[in-house]
């Protein structure tokens, strides 16, 4: 029942183009295979990237498998990080985004854990498991 609710909430996020936090879940192997369409940006290079106007939408999902709450930032068109959400251990969060938009994951202390940007021409859903 819990998995069905998570899938329903994810579907609502897709239909209404909103970001959502869902409860704890384990990624399926199909979702794990979708990690490949993004590449990791080195934390030292985050200040060199910014969002660009884009047309190709997809859904990015972050799954926090760490023991600490993490902050998720979108890098805007000026290269400034904007806090979008915080995700607790075991939680997942989905957001509609564009291929040309980078995302940064930070600890509450501000320490960069990872940053991501798309490299695929054909995206639908992308799961990023933060370990």
Image (cartoon, rainbow, N blue to C red):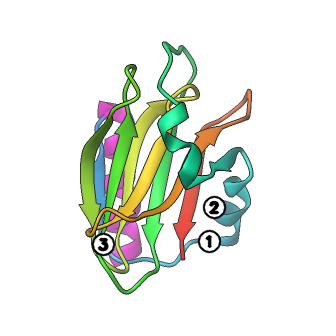
Quadrant location, the C terminus: bottom right
SS category of the residue bearing label 3 = loop
Q: Quadrant of residue 25?
A: bottom left
> In this view of the protein, which residue sits in the foreground, 36 or 67?
67
Per the rendering, the mark at residue 124 is none
- Residue bearing mark 1: 28
SS category of the residue bearing label 2 = helix
Q: Position of residue 78 (x, y in %)?
A: 37, 21
Pick out the residue farthest to the bottom: 67
> In this view of the protein, which residue sits in the foreground, 13 or 90?
90
- Residue bearing mark 2: 31
Is 66 rendered above or below residue 118?
below
Instruction: Name the magenta segment's main secondary structure.
Output: helix
Q: Position of residue 53 (x, y in %)?
A: 48, 12
Gap between marks 1 and 3 measured at Cα? 15 Å
- 98 to the left or right of 96: right
Reading the chain from its start, which is encountered first: label 2 or label 3?
3
Residue numbers of the magenta segment: 1-17
Q: Position of residue 77 (x, y in %)?
A: 40, 20
SS category of the residue bearing label 1 = loop
- Residue bearing mark 3: 23
Q: Quadrant of residue 1?
A: bottom left
Gap between marks 2 and 1 measured at Cα? 5 Å
The crowd level at tag 3 (other Cα within 10 Å; few <14, some 14-19, many 20+) is some
Residue 113 shows up from this direction: yes
Asked if the magenta segment contains residue 23, the reply would be no
* Residue at left offset 38%, top offset 61%: 106
* Residue at left offset 48%, top offset 38%: 47
């Amino acid at each position: 029942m819990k998995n069905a609710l998570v899938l329903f909430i994810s579907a609502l996020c897709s239909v209404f183009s909103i970001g959502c936090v869902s409860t704890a879940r384990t990624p399926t192997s199909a979702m794990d295979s979708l990690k490949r369409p993004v590449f990791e940006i080195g934390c030292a290079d985050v200040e060199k990237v910014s969002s660009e106007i884009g047309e190709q939408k997809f859904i990015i999902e972050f799954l926090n498998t760490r023991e600490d709450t993490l902050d998720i930032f979108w890098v805007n068109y000026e290269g400034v990080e904007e806090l979008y959400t915080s995700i607790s251990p075991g939680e997942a969060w989905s957001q509609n985004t564009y291929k040309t938009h980078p995302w940064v994951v930070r600890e509450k202390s501000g320490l960069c854990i990872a940053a991501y940007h798309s490299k695929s021409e054909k995206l639908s859903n992308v799961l990023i498991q933060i370990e």
